Image (tube, grey):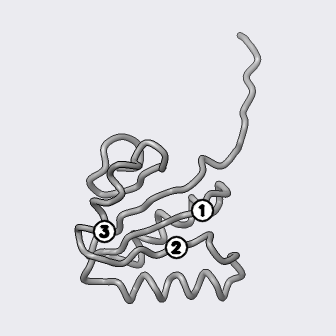
Amino acid sequence: MAPALVVREPAGVVGAVVPFNGPIMSAAAKIAPALAAGCTIVFKPAPETPLDAFVLAEAAEAAGVPPGVVNVLPGDATAGRRWSPIRTSIEWSSPAAPGPGG
């Protein structure tokens, strides 16, 4: 058996689309692993629950997370569609995203 080398390095920016049903738990389940891996995160809450996202971002700031590490992108479906051209450069976590994390 050949030796294996495990390299732990951040993937970069993680984009997360958070559904309206269970916004705090869904966002936390996406943000915590991204932060643990050393990644920054941009998350788009559902249009029905933007205030939950801001409360979570304020909690991250109060916990000492540096500015710019947790970012909130509120808006309707149009805001989410604007990310589609850059999907290849962002690791995705969405209830409807294809592939890992989807």
Q: Earlier in the sequence, mark 1 or mark 3?
A: 1
Cβ atoms under marks 1 and 2 closer than 8 Å: yes
Is 60 placed left or right of 85 in the picture?
Answer: right
- Residue in the image at 60% along x and 47% along y: 11
Q: How crowded is the residue under tag 1: few (<14 C-alpha within 10 Å), some, or many (20+)?
A: many
Q: Earlier in the sequence, mark 3 or mark 2?
A: 2
Q: How crowded is the residue under tag 3: few (<14 C-alpha within 10 Å), some, or many (20+)?
A: few
Q: CA distance from mark 1 to mark 3?
A: 19 Å
Q: Secondary structure at mark 1?
A: strand
Q: Which mark is residue 79?
A: 3
In the picture, the quarter occupied by the N terminus is top right
Q: Which residue is mark 2?
A: 71
Dividing the picture into quadrants, the one containing residue 74 is bottom left
Q: Is residue 91 above or below residue 46?
A: above
Cβ atoms under marks 1 and 3 closer than 8 Å: no
- Residue in the image at 43% along x and 71% along y: 27
Amino acid type, callout 3? Ala
Q: Which residue is mark 1?
A: 40
Is 70 placed left or right of 7 in the picture?
Answer: left
Frontmost residue, 16 versus 90: 90
Amino acid type, callout 2? Asn
Q: How crowded is the residue under tag 2: few (<14 C-alpha within 10 Å), some, or many (20+)?
A: some
- Residue in the image at 36% along x and 64% along y: 17
The nearer-to-camera label among 3 and 2 is 3
Amino acid type, callout 1? Thr
Q: Position of residue 51 (x, y in %)?
A: 38, 89
